Image (spheres, coloured by chain):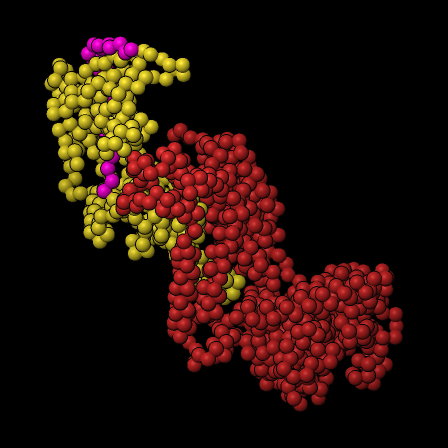
Chain colours: A red, B yellow
Amino acid sequence: MKVQPLGTDGSLLASLPWTLGALGFALAPHLPYLPMWITVASLGCAIWRYRIEKRRGMLPSRWVRGGLALACFLGVLVTYSSVSGVGPGSALLAIMASLKLLETRRRRDQFVLLFISIFLVMSSLLREQYLWSLLYLLAGTLLILTAWLRMSAGENESARQSFMTGSRLMLYAAPLAIAMWVFFPRIATPFWAVPIDTSRATSGLSDTMSPGDISSLSMSNEVAFRVRFKSEIPEPRDRYWRGLVLTSFNGRTWTGSEPGIAAPASEQITVRGEPVSYEVTLEPTRQHWVFALDMPMSWTLDKTFMGPQQQLSRALPIDQRIAYEVDSYLDYKIEAELPALFRDRYTKVPNNNQRAAELARQMRSSTGSDGAYIEAVLAKFHNEEYYYTLEPPPLGSSPVDRFLFDTRRGFCEHYASAFAFLMRSAGIPSRVVLGYQGGEINPLGGHLIVRQSDAHAWTEVWLPDLGWYRVDPTAAVAPERIDYGTLDVAFDGIGASWGFAAPSKLLHNLSLTLDALSAKWNDWILGYGPDTQNKFMEWLGMQNPDWRKMMLTMITIVIVLIGAISGLLMLRNRKPVKDRAAILYQRFIKLTGMQPHTGETAADFAHRVALANVLESRSVNAIVTAYLDARYGPADDATLLRLKNAVTAIG
Amino acid sequence: MSSIQWPFPSPAGVLNSLRNGVALRVRRWARKRQGIDKTTTKLRPGRVYILPTGVGLVFALMAFAMLLGSMNYNNNLSFILTFILIGIGFVSMHQCQRNLVGLELSFAGTDSVFAGQSMQFRIAITNQSKSARYGIRLFSDSEHSDAHDLQPGESKIFTLPVATQQRGWVSLDRFGIRTLFPFELFRAWAWLHMDLRGLAFPSPAEQPPEPPPTTVAHGHRQHDARGEEDFAGLRKYNEGDSPRHVAWKAFARSGQLFSKQFAGADTSSQWFDFSEIPVADVEVRLSILTSWVVTADRTLEDYGLRIPGKEFEPAHGDAHRRQCLEALALFDKDPS
């Protein structure tokens, strides 16, 4: 078979840069998630294709393209070791678009490219939705529409005109889009579940804890969740957001092994006082943990259960931002009785931290009770030279020993781990709780922001009569961490050492403003789901809203709006242009004193006028030529002026 | 090996004949519904038809897929994107139809051609509205014109080629105007039945026999100082004579139109006679006569034409040429 190389003729030169621009814009948000070689390949293809068009060169042959496609497909397979899912999916889409460029010769190929661009924009929205995502999608759509119009634009049409036409049509489409968006019935359950993306590590909590392995704590300012309290906001020292509970320690790593379920966990809790009611808007974590203030008693999230250690978890991973309401009690008591079997599990320690175990036995024997022992350990952390630092030195194979006796520097994980170890070694059941502590009140939105940097680890010890009782050893070392949060600690540190606390505060205030906007955005736009929609429909006055009523309303509004748009377009059509040439010609007809017959052309009429000898034939000729030029030639002012002069000459 | 004829029509053939049948029916229906159009017709909304294009169908499919995706992920931003695109679809449907409505089409003549050449039908399209019109195209069953934009108030001549096979009237019973603007999602079109026609002259014979000999008459050359030719007399006004040569004074006196005749140049003239060509076939004779007329016209010699029922005295000029060629084109045909 003979393979024909494909020639280009430069006919796409006007529209190709726009198509490339639209494609690039659509691809941009994917690039951080894609392996570097795809970015390079896409850029290479775009430049290559543009140069071919500019030189009217040949497109690469089918074999070259086929080889490239195969290589890229294998590349994806090697990089992801899979071709399904959003990550490899968008990688393939990016590659398809780039390779499609190399065979784009006709307008049909360009359509395919623009459609791929639309899909790329959409899949980037599936991945992340920020405040600016709306701007991004609007700009992307406008760019794609402009590129689309450029494809069929006439030679005289400027890019600006195409852009204006695109904007105008998008403006017409906007009310339709808004009406459909508001009234299109939202459903709660998805048709199918596809993992969104796991390729970029998120700074959420991990399922295990190994103090000393990671030598610095993430200071990510990313929001973990936002909380809107319906009652008074608890004090910082009471804001412990329970996440997961770690129960086993192998000497290095704490893991959350389950010691079996004795009874439904929530039945083991007794509470006192008034509940704290609040709504949490949780950012996607791709994990199962659901965060709530110690101690949650009721929640509105579906498929969410309380585990044996009173941790909330959801059956489905949290792939999207979700909101749920919780009632928590600050005054609670868990598991007054602890079966002997569990007591063993919660006091089990490996024997690779001998010095620490020895210290525990000594201290316990020199104190009279468990309570006194706990006090003594906390006092040791408080009084001796232990420091709170976000960048502690790494610990070796006996992390507890090394931390307690040598380095003496660490953050919450180190203290929680060491404390729980000391408790267990002295026979007191203990466990580590991971979650968030504190959070910052946004004065603009009135809500609480809990960031990834607020991640915290604390311990719970079991004492007869008291049950599981929260002890936060970090508070003994760095009480300000508990009272003011990590961020303030960090800010003070930076401010003190660099002397620009003020600008940092300014920036911080700016970020609070953005956060307030973001929270509103999340509540009203991103969080517009079945419940919010129902509420909104009721607010609009719809009785018992259901999907039929919403559909009907949507269709009615869309039909009315389309009618309005059609009317608007008709109005633009109807307005006749004041044809100056025609007006001048009418004046000429009046001057002749004759009347053109129906269907008589201007030239024929002029002939008749000339024959009738009422006017000088030369001026008649001049008028008719100028008139015909003005009507059928390029409508410029010079011809009109010529016509005007000719008519005034006889009048 | 002999092939056995498949006894049933092929599916593609059936589909094709079905499509042609439907097209014919639709065509008859449209013609009956709209009647014959005047040579200047303004497009009313009722006669502009619209259907989605292939691109439009793919676009609809894509929008539907995006809607399902948005519902599945309950993603409000992708809902926004989807609904904007659906909105764009609705808007472009109306914009597409409105892009044609209100345009005024008027027949602006044809250039006469020789049979075998393609005849350019000129249609002037005027946009009298305040909004520009984009990507307007004329089309017939087999051909289409270039696409042009029309700015507000602008008028442009569109040419639609029609193939000619034989001499005589070439008619264009119907043609269409169409647009794909803005996004090629929809095709809006209107049929016009103006019953236009143009004349195709016989195609000139490629190797005609030598024309009959020329007779030369010497004119009396009397140049005046400015080198202008002498006024020779008046003759009855013929259509096509230059208005500059019309004798207005004579017209004022008598009410009759006369053209001034000028003398001075040598005139050589020849007669082309249908009956003297030794070829039996009428069409071939007409072709030969045509090629003689064309050649003689180029050499600026006077020539006369004699065909059964018609005779043109030797003369030359565009009007004369046209008269002769028209007579040849319509020989033995209904002249109306």
Pick the front one: A321 or B216: B216
Query: Residue A80's spot in the image, x, y percent?
Result: 56, 51
Of residues B103 and A128, the one nearer the viewer is B103
Query: In the current view of this chain or complex, which residue is farthest to the right?
Result: A384
Asked whether, in this view, residue A188 is left or right of residue A221, the answer is left
Residue B273 at x, y percent in the picture: 15, 17
Q: Is residue B204 magenta?
A: yes
Res A495 → quadrant: bottom right
Q: Which residues are magenta?
A: B195-220
**Left of B114 or right of it: where is A407?**
right
Q: Where is residue A423? Give x, y as percent.
A: 76, 76
* Quarter the C terminus of chain A occupies: top left
A414 relative position to B50: left or right: right
Residue at (53% x, 34% y) in the render: A54
Majority SS type along the magenta span: loop
The answer to whether residue A144 is visible is: no
Q: Residue at x 33, y 12 (%)?
A: B222
Q: Give the side of residue A629 with respect to residue A446, left or right.
A: left
